[in-house]
Amino acid sequence: MLLELKGLQVNYGGIRAVKGIDLVVREGELVCLIGANGAGKSTTLRAICGLLPAAAGSIRYAGQDTAGAPVHELPRRGLVMAPEGRGIFAQLTVEENLAMGAYTRSDAGVARDLERQYEIFPRLKERRTQTAGTLSGGEQQMLAIGRALMARPKLLLLDEPSMGLAPRLVAKIFEIVREIARQGVTILLVEQNARRALEVANRGYVMESGSITLAGEAQGLLENPKVREAYLGETA
Amino acid sequence: MDIFVQQIINGLTLGAVYAIVALGYTMVYGIIQLINFAHGEVVMIGAMVSFTIINALAAAGLPPLAVVLIGAGCAIPVCMLVGYAMERMAYRPLRLAPRLAPLITAIGVSIILQHLAMLVWSRNVLAFPQIIPLTTYTFLGATITGVQITILGLCLAMMAGLALLVYRTRLGTAMRATAQNPQVARLMGVDVNRVIAATFIIGAGLGAVAGVMVGTYYGVAQYTMGSVLGLKAFAAAVLGGIGNIPGAMVGGLLLGVVEALGAGYIGDLTDLCRYGLGPAASCADGGHFVLFGSNYQDVFAFVVLILVLVFRPSGLLGERVGDRA
């Protein structure tokens, strides 16, 4: 078990945004957490990476409780988040952004990994010396994912990677997510785009007003009438 | 003409020092949006420590340059410690507080440091021993002293070094990333507290050198010397665009030149006899009736500050218009 949440409760903005959830991610899995806007998905991710404290319950990563671990310590242990809204450093160049992803590393593989990101995202290579703020939304999202990969994550947390992107780019982003998972990176994907997320994931959790209401194999959730009605826009 | 060149030389020398002090303001502002009003006091402490050392070693028969270097070598770590201590004790506990709280705290830290210095070094104006031989060179009809050349060269070297640190190293990249988005920088593994502390320490180290230079240039030091110097350097940082590192360098040099030219010409330009307005008794036989003399030198920095705040609040090189105090 790479990640294990037990009875996790998190407060955000004065309310209990996460009301006691259980969630596990096993090594090699691509797990998605879907739900409507404000269901508590992003709050859950922020708690996992230490940006918000758990009000109750526990978060175990790689067998260790993360309570009290400083935020900057977790990437060193392979827990890496690509934050919502991309969170790129707009005034740094594309290459500096990628270098920041490898901030915790000092091994010789960094240069090779940089080349790898440029292979996956050729647009970033073309724009390596531009400041990241000049990139389009889709390119910024690719930069955010590439930057996270530069840390060589064991567990990659992706917070709404398709948010605000044109449909063509959404498809491209999910293709990339699937490819990253295929290369052995464990992923916890938070998405509002439930259909796309369930199509690439192994398993999924459905979150509603702070609680997990459904969980299971992604294929099963895609066929579940409740999910189809509430999240896939179909009438049962 | 030669007074023009002379004032440019004097202005660049002074401006280079302003630039070095302005960097301390702008780096801290860039990373935590705090105007560290106590930074001028760090410069003062640098001058004071070097005074103590230079004074003690003046009679030892060492070469003058070595004495000054030892003075700077003692001032730098002391100032770095002061810079680190103020961040750790005064500002870090207020990191999440409303913006006004750290600002007022900065003024408090400034007062505390000033009065601690008064207790240590007394209220008197301390005169540096005259150990550096006065060497002068003629340049385009103006004179430039060896000290001026040294100050200019050293300041430019420090600016280049800082630019390399900020734009070419891992720490520098982390500093810029933290300045833009501390939350995401933490997610990348940056220990934001350490980066902020490093910023204070680097700024204080630069301030220490500036203090030594000001002390040896003017030959005097006093516990109050940090406030006007600090405010001028702050004006230079605003002129260049607060938070912008190249801006602080440009703003400092420009402010120094403006100030020197202003001081050089204000007497002539406000001589009422020139305009036939002066009292006849004073103006007779080519006499003068000067409204403002070069003792108004200090006014120019603040006139520039006001003009910038009114007409271009983002400064010369700043992009973002400041939305905060």
Image (cartoon, rainbow, N blue to C red):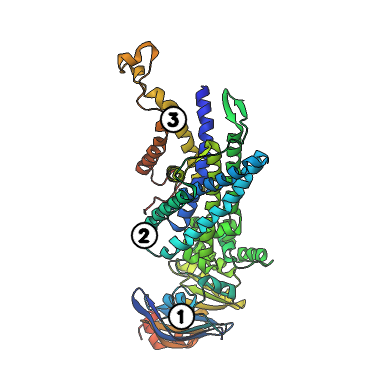
Q: Nearer the viewer, residue B12 or A63?
A: B12
Name the chain under label 2: B
Dot 3 corresponds to which residue?
A: B263
Q: x%, y% of residue B203? A: 52, 52
In the image, is residue B36 above or below residue A119?
Answer: above
Dot 2 corresponds to which residue?
A: B101
Q: x%, y% of residue B314? A: 41, 47
Name the chain under label 1: A
Marks 1 and 2 in Cβ contact (< 8 Å): no
Residue type for callout 1 = Leu
> Separation of disc 3 and disc 1 at Cα?
68 Å
SS of the residue under disc 2: helix
SS of the residue under disc 1: strand
Q: Residue furthest top?
A: B285
Residue A12 image-quadrant placement: bottom left
Please tell me whether mark 3 or mark 1 is closer to you in this view.
3
Residue type for callout 2 = Ala
Q: Residues within 10 Å of mark 2 (few under 14, many from 20)?
A: few
Q: Residue at x 43, y 45 (%)?
A: B227
> Separation of disc 1 and disc 2 at Cα?
40 Å
In this rendering, does residue B251 appear at all? yes
Q: Residue furthest right?
A: A108
Dot 1 corresponds to which residue?
A: A33
Q: Nearer the viewer, residue B277 or A126?
A: B277
Q: Residue at x 44, y 61 (%)?
A: B90
In the displayed structure image, the side of residue A102 where residue A140 appears, left or right: left
Disc number placed over residue A141 in the picture, else none: none
Q: Nearer the viewer, residue B201 or B2?
A: B201
In the image, is residue A183 above or below residue B86?
Answer: below
Image quarter where the N terminus of chain A lies is bottom right
